[in-house]
Image (spheres, rainbow, N blue to C red):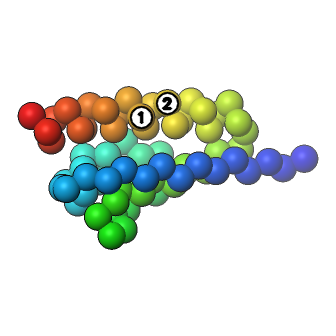
Amino acid sequence: MDVNCRIEIETLHPDAEDLAACLRPDNTEEMDTFVDDGRVVTVIERPSPGSLRSTADDYVRNLSIALDVLDN
């Protein structure tokens, strides 16, 4: 049975382009980060719920660090 799990995370930020640029280097092949109407959108697709959760957790940690850097 093939399973494809997907999550889309949106983040509003006044410097969306800069935030996306901070996040993109850590993307895996299963991730896409882009800016849409002032929002940073990251789409993650993984073959299982567990791997999706792990990748999303890593992304959220990276997002938190990037926000700290940009906002300070």
Q: Which residue is mark 2?
A: 57
Which residue is pictured at 72% across the width and 39% down the height?
48
Which residue is pictured at 48% across the width and 49% down the height?
9
Q: Circle 2: is it few (<14), some (14-19), or many (20+) Cα within 10 Å?
A: few
Q: Secondary structure at mark 2?
A: helix
Which of these two is toward me, 23 or 13? 13
Q: Which residue is mark 1?
A: 60
Report the amino acid beneath label 2: Asp
| In the image: residue 13, left or right of residue 36 | left
Q: Residue 55: horizontal and vertical position, in percent?
A: 53, 36
Q: Residue 17: horizontal and vertical position, in percent?
A: 23, 60
| In the image: residue 30, left or right of residue 35 | right
Report the amino acid beneath label 1: Val
Q: Hey, which residue is sitting farthest right in the picture?
A: 1
Which residue is pictured at 31% across the width and 32% down the height?
64
Q: Is residue 68 above or below residue 28?
A: above
Q: Is residue 21 visible?
A: no
Q: Hey, which residue is sitting farthest left in the picture?
A: 72
Q: Secondary structure at mark 1?
A: helix
Pointer 2 and pointer 1: residues touching (CB < 8 Å)? Answer: yes
Q: Circle 1: is it few (<14), some (14-19), or many (20+) Cα within 10 Å?
A: few
